[in-house]
Amino acid sequence: MAAKFSSDSPSFAPRLNLIGGEWRKASTGKTFDDINPVRSAGFQPAGSLGLTGPAGSQRSIGRFPLSTEADVDAAVRAASEAFKTWRKVPAPQRGAILRRCADALAAEKEELARLMAREMGKTLIEARGDVQEAIDCANLYAGFSRTFGGQTLPSELPDKFAMSVRKPLGVCGQITPWNFPIAIPSWKAFPALLCGNTVILKPAEDSPACASAFGRVLMSAGVPAGVFNVVHGEGEVAGAALVNHPGVAAISFTGSSETGKIIAENCGRQLKRCSLELGGKNAQIVMDDADLNLALEGAVWGAFATAGQRCTATSRLILHEKIYDRFLRRFIDAAKALRLGDPLDAKTQIGPLVNAAQLERVENYIRIGIEEGATLRLGGRRARGRGLNAGHFFEPTIFTDVTPSMRIAREEIFGPVCAVMSFKRVDEAVSILNGTRYGLSSSIYTRDVNAAFRAMRELEAGITYINGPTIGAEVHLPFGGVKETGNGHREAGAAVLDFYSEWQSVYVDYSGKLQRAQIDT
Ligand code: ADP
């Protein structure tokens, strides 16, 4: 099927909520602005009251509904109604719809990627990857649809049959960030739908258009009305209403640790199932025997792709002292050569930060690093130059003389900032890598297989790459982290199916008499 729409047109990403298969305004009629980060430096989002450029204009992608509790309630009612029939659709048929979602996303991949680049600023090549991840994800869970299920097990008693079956939870709330605006909603939605749940997505305020476009594509692929819903708005209002609604069975959240803790507390009070994917402070170790060209490419990609705005970004580089000087020099040169610019330009390697608040946060960490005594070796300021002045661009930044106790070595910055440290022995490198409250992604470059396997055993991280950068997860493996990166759940792969389903153990006694387990055995 050829793409029918252009991402510039409002119908490509309806600026409305998707509730029960209908596109609706917020019940109050209020809206917020979706700001283009390439052209909006100094532009204050005006919400429903101020002025904005027309949709598709340089600085505004459009205005989206500022939803309240009433809109969330309408979505919960629609999703609960749809659940009554969706839960009974045979899983292979649900899988067939997911397969059509994959095809529909593939048909619109380029336009979706362009919208994403414009809306949140990742480069086109990365935006295509984001959409591809959603396609892979839809195909993965479509594939599972004929094999996922429970177990048959022997009973300890004669003439008795024992099995476990998966059942859906009901309405699942999904609260997502802006940095993977189609991939993350897809990781959450497709396995939830496969398991027979219905979904309400509350996307980030910085990427509503991608979420609406995702919803439209799912509808066009045959996802029935009410099975997938989108409610736009602020986290503290629409997001909180979703978390607190008694009709929502589970919340899957990706975002900051601060917000994750609030959500977990609110879910805890209701004994609501809750999956959290939170921050990271990922590191790449480079051993003295590593292929340094490969390690350099990995470090540059890991630290600066998506301008460092990935939860798996390489924000620490831990170098063996023997290669420290050589490697650092090359790392600085490579970072300096990166080309900042409009993400829609194919030559651009780094786009802008997503918004003014993010820019201020990164600047604040530069101040903190300098105050703590780290040496700023590259960048550390807003990027200036042709095509950059109007956007939230920040120069690739490298700190040296960093100690593991400094805040820039422990806290998530979410920008193009890398803290470089050195080590003598591998156990020292491992302890530096492990020395944060997070544990998402980790990487080690070495040619020594023994060192690689020891690192695999010792690194406190949900994801470890040997001779690869800290970024680059694939959808069929579990994704998530240890310590304060999450609360023990995993997304993606087969692992997430346990989050989105409830186990039911079924015993069928065909002996015709009372048989007592543990007593009549
Ligand atoms: P970041 O933008 O740094 O990832 P957040 O963790 O605040 O920050 O945002 C991730 C998502 O969580 C967004 O969709 C946001 O609207 C939502 N959110 C923010 N605060 C809350 C809250 N109190 N309850 C529910 N959702 C929230």
Image (cartoon, rainbow, N blue to C red):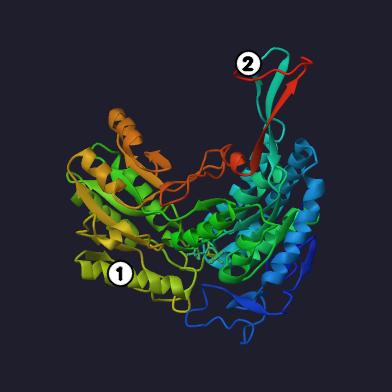
* Rendered position, 279 above or below 193: below
Residue 379 in the image: x percent, y percent? Answer: 31, 68
Instruction: Kindly identify the residue that appears in the image at 60 percent across and 71 percent down.
Output: 237
Residue 309 in the image: x percent, y percent? Answer: 45, 60
Left/right placement of residue 120 relative to residue 455 reads right
Quadrant of the image occupied by residue 46: bottom right
Mark 2 vs mark 1, CA separation in Å: 64 Å
- 505 and 396: which is toward the camera: 505
- 261 and 139: which is toward the camera: 261
Q: Which mark is residue 156?
A: 2
Left/right placement of residue 2 relative to residue 295 reads right
Dot 2 amino acid type: Glu
Residue depth check, mark 2 versus mark 1: number of the one nearer the observer: 2
Dot 1 amino acid type: Ile
| Disc 1 target residue | 366
Q: Quadrant of the C terminus?
A: top right
Instruction: Kindly identify the residue that appears in the image at 41 percent across and 46 percent down.
Output: 441
Q: Is residue 126 visible?
A: yes
* Rendered position, 416 above or below 511: below
Q: Is residue 4 visible?
A: no
Does the residue tagged 2 have its C-beta within 8 Å of any atom of ligand 1?
no
> Mark 2 or mark 1, which has the lower sequence index?
2
The answer to whether marks 2 and 1 mark residues whose Cβ atoms lie closer than 8 Å is: no
Does the residue tagged 1 have its C-beta within 8 Å of any atom of ligand 1?
no
Query: Callout 1: few (<14), some (14-19), or many (20+) C-alpha neighbours within 10 Å?
Result: many
Kind of element beneath mark 2: loop
- 249 and 472: which is toward the camera: 249
Instruction: Give the number of marks.
Output: 2
